[in-house]
Amino acid sequence: MTSDNKYESKMGGIVHKDWKEKRVVDTWQIFKIIAEFVEGFEKMSKIGPCVSLFGSARTQPDNKYYALATEVAEKLAHKGFGVITGGGPGIMEAGNKGAHNAGGISVGLNIELPFEQHSNPYIDRDKNIDFDYFFVRKVMFVKYAQGFVVLPGGFGTLDELFEALTLIQTLKIGKFPIVLLGKDFWGGMVQWIEDVLLKQERNISPDDMFLFTLVDTADEAVEYIEDFYKKYLLKPNF
């Protein structure tokens, strides 16, 4: 077998593919990634203990979960926690709105997307941070969060939830409170995790079911986080 493609090489009778774009692009990209980490660390390290709040960008203000997100953010702010969201509309806006209304710290970790995403007006001006890379943004959500409150959302919300659970499960970070808020929405998934992942396939351990809690009200969510920090110190996760 022969190939006239200069991006392919023949070894052992197999034509191996190669990258067509210039590899130097990857090298220069490192500096942009480093710059995002540096900006994020510098700004977030000065803010103090926060709770990251997640949920769908598509949730409308007349939705019950929008009101619930606003309520839980207000209550967290009254307890002295800042609120971190993805900075966009929907549940994120509701979280920032609650923190803002209560006079608390309101942080937005925004990202450029082809749809849905734009900064909401309830973020503190000096705490609106823009990212190009999802993985850098996700580090900020976890590193500076003293807890997660997860409201109904889509793939992005699930991604943040299961990454945090994986990091705690694998002891890459210490345990911190993860609250699923909304039993009607999350109950089926939690039951599936228990029935299929745990009991049927044994893909997780029984203790993994205690890495999160499922509640229905803002008061329960805040109480769970408060009770956790009666036993543990407030500190960055890594």
Image (cartoon, rainbow, N blue to C red):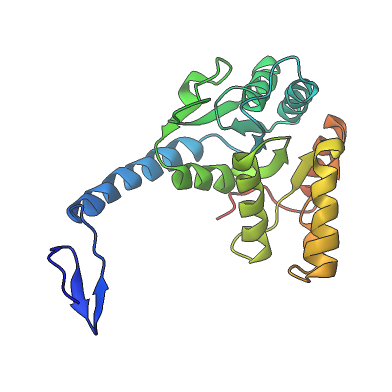
Residue 115 in picture, x, y percent from top left: 49, 26
Q: Nearer the viewer, residue 53 or 10?
A: 10
Determine if residue 118 is in view.
yes
Residue 71 in picture, x, y percent from top left: 78, 23
Dividing the picture into quadrants, the one containing residue 184 is top right
Q: Quadrant of the C terminus?
A: bottom right
The correct choice, above or below, for 86 with respect to 137 in the image is: above
Q: Nearer the viewer, residue 88 or 168?
A: 88
User: Residue at horizontal 70%, vertical 31%?
Assistant: 80
User: Going by the image, does 225 lie left or right of 171?
Assistant: right
Residue 87 in picture, x, y percent from top left: 55, 27
**Residue at the farthest front position:** 1
Determine if residue 227 is in view.
no
User: Going by the image, does 136 lie left or right of 183?
Assistant: left
**Residue at the farthest bottom position:** 12
User: Residue at horizontal 26%, vertical 71%?
Assistant: 16
User: Going by the image, does 206 lie left or right of 127?
Assistant: right
Q: Nearer the viewer, residue 33 or 83?
A: 33
User: Going by the image, does 4 lie left or right of 184?
Assistant: left
User: Residue at horizontal 16%, vertical 74%?
Assistant: 2
Residue 112 in picture, x, y percent from top left: 43, 30
The correct choice, above or below, for 93 with respect to 230 in the image is: above
User: Residue at horizontal 58%, vertical 47%?
Assistant: 142
